[in-house]
Amino acid sequence: MVRSLQILIIAVEGVTDRDYITTAIKLFSPELSTLIDNGQLRVFTKEGEGGCKALVDYSLAWILSKNKSKLVVLLDKDSAGIKAHDEIIANDFYITKGNSRVYVKYLEPSEVIVENIYKAKLDLSYEIEHLLSIECWKQIVSQNWSEPRSVEELVKFIGAASVPDVALTDSITSIISDADLRNTIVLNNPHTDKKTNICNWLLKQTDEVKKEYMLGFNRTIEKLKSIFSTNS
């Protein structure tokens, strides 16, 4: 059972991140959903000032305010998220005063990413939209709401598994045989200008469809439950 504390905060990078996490909580965690309904838990982003820099500033301000409640900072596992994560945990205020109540966490990878990519020792960066199911991603790609990952991302992804004298895309094809996986979350990012389209479209679906499309958020919700259930 999740403990009732002061107002608990989950801080995320932007408005769509807030909507995804709030929706996932309502779909997969009655305990956390009740805390939201009772005003004991809030999913927060700075309207119009989101992004990783805002999360760094917010987390340090939280520590300096001597707020005794828990703050969870949720970050994408991409270059910007990794930079923000490292900046917060290296800060002297976090080290000396804040690490018992400020939790700096990456979004947990979906089961699809864990089973098909991480267990193969591959390094795939991901944004919150990459937690959506492959079937959902097929719709995202078909609606032109995605954009190709950069060459730099793909080179880092295959790393030592690259095949000498073979084109990058051919190397990826040889490593990721599942065409649906390869042609969705492996080769694509959500288009920077279409993230609101993706989120709004998803939220219009039935709860049954949303549960299917958002199953990849389950690991993150379980992580949040474990943080808010502890006594410290």
Image (tube, rainbow, N blue to C red):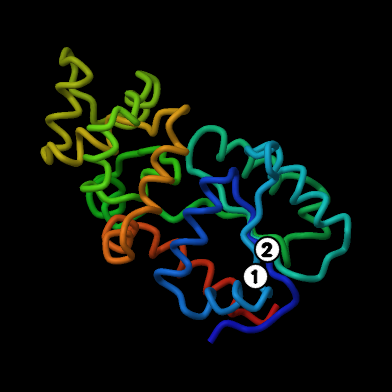
Q: Which residue is mark 2?
A: 9
In this rendering, is residue 169 above or below 20? above
Counting from the top left corner in percent of width and height, residue 204 is at 37, 53
Dividing the picture into quadrants, the one containing residue 47 is: top right
Counting from the top left corner in percent of width and height, residue 156 is at 37, 28
Of the residues shown, which amino acid type is indicated by label 1?
Leu
| Residue at x 65%, y 39% (from the top left corner) | 50
| Residue at x 52%, y 74% (from the top left corner) | 33
| Residue at x 33%, y 65% (from the top left corner) | 207
Dividing the picture into quadrants, the one containing residue 104 is: bottom right
| Residue at x 38%, y 26% (from the top left corner) | 153
Counting from the top left corner in percent of width and height, residue 205 is at 32, 56
Dividing the picture into quadrants, the one containing residue 154 is: top left
Q: Gap between marks 1 and 2, in whole Å?
A: 6 Å
Counting from the top left corner in percent of width and height, residue 177 is at 11, 38
Do residues under tags 1 and 2 come within 8 Å of each other at their CB atoms?
yes
In this rendering, is residue 31 above or below 69? below
Secondary-structure class at tag 1: strand
Q: Give the mark, 1 or 2, whose residue is nearer the N terminus.
A: 2
Secondary-structure class at tag 2: strand
Q: Is residue 5 left or right of residue 166?
A: right
Q: Is residue 58 left or right of residue 26?
A: right
Instruction: Give the crowd class for mark 2: few <14, some 14-19, many >=20 residues within 10 Å.
Output: some
Q: Residue furthest bottom?
A: 1
Q: Residue furthest top?
A: 165
Pick the residue in front: 117 or 57.
57
Q: Which residue is mark 1?
A: 41
Q: Is residue 29 left or right of residue 136?
A: right
Q: Which numbered marker is on residue 197? A: none
Instruction: Give the crowd class for mark 1: few <14, some 14-19, many >=20 residues within 10 Å.
Output: many
Q: In what quadrant of the picture does the C terminus appear? A: bottom right
